[in-house]
Amino acid sequence: MSQKIRYEIEFPINSSPQLLYQYISTPSGLQEWFADMVNSRGEFFTFEWDDVEEHARLASKKTGEKVKFKWVDDDKKDTEYFFELRILEDEITKDVSLMVVDFAEEEELSESKKLWENQVSDLKHVIGSV
């Protein structure tokens, strides 16, 4: 298995950090734009797309700022990969951005970035930031 590459993408979003945080940190919020179905039991989250199910553990969160999900294997043990959603707010302009940190294999990097662009576009529609 090839090593995955870490990458970051920043998306400007017209939203308050508080509203945006609800959409990146709760199963109901994530289900509106990130996955077809999102369930949680304690710190463990299940994400479903079509017929594919992925499992992650909420590794860390800072209210109003960021969430980090670590992908877990079938035994609920952490893998080395994660995705992080971080809210950035410019102190002067108060512009808000969503920073996405994720991993992809080199040959899938551009496709992975496009997928995030599409998902964040859905998020912007949901919160009225278009």
Image: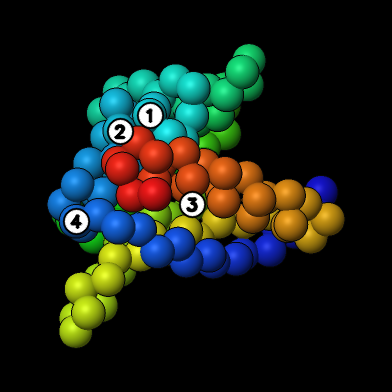
Residue at label 2?
29
Residue 41 visible (yes or no): yes
- Mark 4–mark 1 Cα distance, whole angstroms, equals 17 Å
Residue position for label 4: 16
User: Contact, CB < 8 Å: mark 1 with mark 2?
Assistant: yes
Amino acid at the residue labelled 2? Gly
Pick the front one: 25 or 45: 25
Task: Mark 1 vs mark 3: give the one in front.
Answer: 1
Measure how far apart labels 4 and 2 are at the Cα level. Answer: 15 Å
Asked if the residues shown at circle 4 and circle 2 are in contact, with their CB atoms under 8 angstroms apart, the answer is no
**Residue 73 percent coordinates (x, y):** 57, 34
Residue in view at x 66 percent, y 50 percent:
114
* Amino acid under disc 4: Ser
Query: Could you tell which of marks 4 and 3 lies nearer the N-terminus?
Result: 4
Q: Earlier in the sequence, mark 1 or mark 3?
A: 1
Q: Where does label 3 land, which residue?
A: 83
> What residue sits right under mark 1 in the picture?
32
Q: Earlier in the sequence, mark 2 or mark 3?
A: 2
Q: Earlier in the sequence, mark 4 or mark 2?
A: 4
- Residue 87 position within the rendered picture, expressed as x and y whole percent measured from the top left: 30, 62
SS category of the residue bearing label 3: strand
- Judging from the image, what secondary structure is the residue with disc 4 in? loop
Local crowd at mark 2 within 10 Å, few (<14), some, or many (≥20)?
Answer: some
Dot 2 falls on a residue whose secondary structure is helix
Residue in the picture at 47% in, 47% down: 120
The spot of residue 29 in percent (x, y) is 30, 33
In the figure, 45 relative to 17: above or below?
Answer: above
Whichever of labels 4 and 1 marks the residue nearer the N terminus, that label is: 4
Cα distance, mark 1 to mark 2? 5 Å
